[in-house]
Image: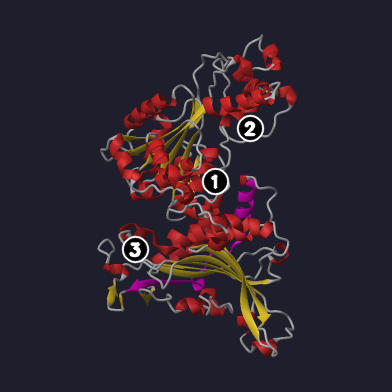
Amino acid sequence: MATLSSTSCRSYATPLLSPSPSSSSSSASASASSSHAPSSSIRGRHHWRITLSSIPKRYCSAKVSSRFHGKCFTSAVHMQDGAVAPAPVENETPFEKLTEGLLSATSSEERKDAAEFLNNNGSTVSITVVGASGDLAKKKIFPALFALYYEDCLPEHFTIFGYSRTKMTDEELRNMISRTLTCRIDKRENCDEKMDQFLKRCFYHSGQYDSQENFAQLDKKLKEHEGGRVSNRLFYLSIPPNIFIEAVRCASLSASSGNGWTRVIVEKPFGRDSESSAALTKALKQYLEEDQIFRIDHYLGKELVENLSVLRFSNLIFEPLWSRQYIRNVQLIFSEDFGTEGRGGYFDHYGIIRDIMQNHLLQILALFAMETPVSLDAEDIRNEKVKVLRSMRPLSLEDVVIGQYKSHTKGGITYPAYTDDNTVPSDSLTPTFAAAALFIDNARWDGVPFLMKAGKALHNKRAEIRVQFRHVPGNLYNRNIGTDLDQATNELVIRVQPDEAIYLKINNKVPGLGMRLDRSNLNLHYAARYSKEIPDAYERLLLDAIEGERRLFIRSDELDAAWSRFTPVLKELEEKKIIPEYYPYGSRGPVGAHYLAARYKVRWGDLGMEQ
């Protein structure tokens, strides 16, 4: 498993110090209410009911003591989960007065003690993996949680629960997930100790996904481990999409936190088209608020995708070039060198366009093409991504090529066709390969083709962004370059996986007395530059969800805009029963993809000589 690239971690941000915008408007009624009033819930959003009488008096400053009659404030404070803009002093809530007093202690030691008390003693995080016996949980989620624990990125008080229909004991769960855990290469000396400590925090509860009673039993177990602290709960839905709603309903009604935040991570697919996606969002919002829903696309957590905005917005040499004036085309390429391999039943229901292009590649495109956001705040970034998606033309059938891999024999080995999978209908027309040309109709990108291609059972495994720049006007060295100007075009390549790298192709003179030109790479090869391993995407995204950072998660209007660009062509492909072009297992894909690129005077960059 890929691991974190540094020995230090982001500090764990406790929600005790992050009241929400809605809390200021309700603070007056909250402070006036009785400390014994029950906590309330609005459509799945649970308000905090924080009793602070247990806070040691040494953490109460003189200002707080004088305001609350010489003792810590003990009335109930009801707050909602979310970010907040600072409230005016004259409207300061009782909670703000308290935290201001706690953190304005007379000495730095007292302030440190007070912050430590709020962060560690005041709250706990309970992470429930719903669908804990599945492959995703075993191969990705539990290893990512252990990686975060190994790097001290989880709060001091946390508990992990597995929940699924499989009958299993706590010890059996620990044995199951222990086989997939790995330790940091440079810290093997305490590997066994860390693993044992982590496994002791892991528990199991068996139950049905549509049973409120079973989730109520889970709630009882969670409370036992939370020990009366402010309880924050994260549910990871590692289950098929057809049971999302029932699981959310039961978790929201029977196992939500009564005094902290409750968040739900939802795995893709988020529907099959605009209509089913909108229906899923509407159903989820019966029980959850939008800021409680974390729609995960693990590609957004990959290191090189994270680096996109850094590369562009913090390097002066790139930002002026990031437009139609200098960029000729942009290519987003995803290929796998294996077929469906046991996932044929699932894959046949969705196909490569829904599985890869509509989410992974389109999300990368939006990050690549967006305007400079106002700030790095999650909403500012997601606002700019939505603008890009809404500026895109809906895909037309003429700009799409689909393919399906067929059987092929190579080196004495026969590789199966897609329809050889027993879970796939023999007459299936589901594409395992697709290429598409997309256009963004705005001032920055007008006329620039964004070419996507994604496929299974191809000649290699890769995911990359290739930015091909325009030809040099009046190039003095045309005679030395020859007739193929494309070979001399500058190209920026961001290789997302595997063997992560960023390199820029430039032209240079070959040493010698003659004038012979060559193409070279200015190369940032991550494995050579950085000794640490790169973190798995799930590690980053799980940590973000725990901290309430939504920048790399998909907002509902963003999802709507993405589906609106692909739904018409998906329906047309299915209604007209378009037959895919067949390509041999292990090849470069259907020939039609090259004709599509050639229509826009583009050559696929991954077919070059320097692979």
Q: Residue flagged by tag 3: what amino acid is it? A: Thr
Q: Is residue 86 left or right of residue 19?
A: right
In the image, is residue 392 above or below residue 241?
A: below
* Residue identifier under label 3: 340
Q: How is the image coloured?
A: secondary structure
2 or 3: tag closer to the N-terminus: 2
First along the sequence among labels 3 and 1: 1
Residue 347 in magenta stretch: no
Q: As displayed, is residue 456 above or below residue 475? A: above
Q: Position of residue 105 (x, y in %)?
A: 68, 21
Residue bearing the label numbered 1: 7
Crowd around label 1: few <14 · some 14–19 · many ≥20 (10 Å): few
Assess whether residue 395 is covered by the magenta stretch: yes
The amino acid marked with disc number 1 is: Thr
Q: CA distance from mark 3 to mark 1?
A: 37 Å
- Could you tell me residue 505's position as x and y percent? 62, 74
Q: Which residue is mark 2?
A: 21
Res 241 visible: no
Q: Report the residue at 63% width, 82% height from top.
A: 518
Query: How far, Cα to Cα, is label 1 from label 2?
Result: 34 Å
Return the residue nearer the eye: 401 or 165.
165
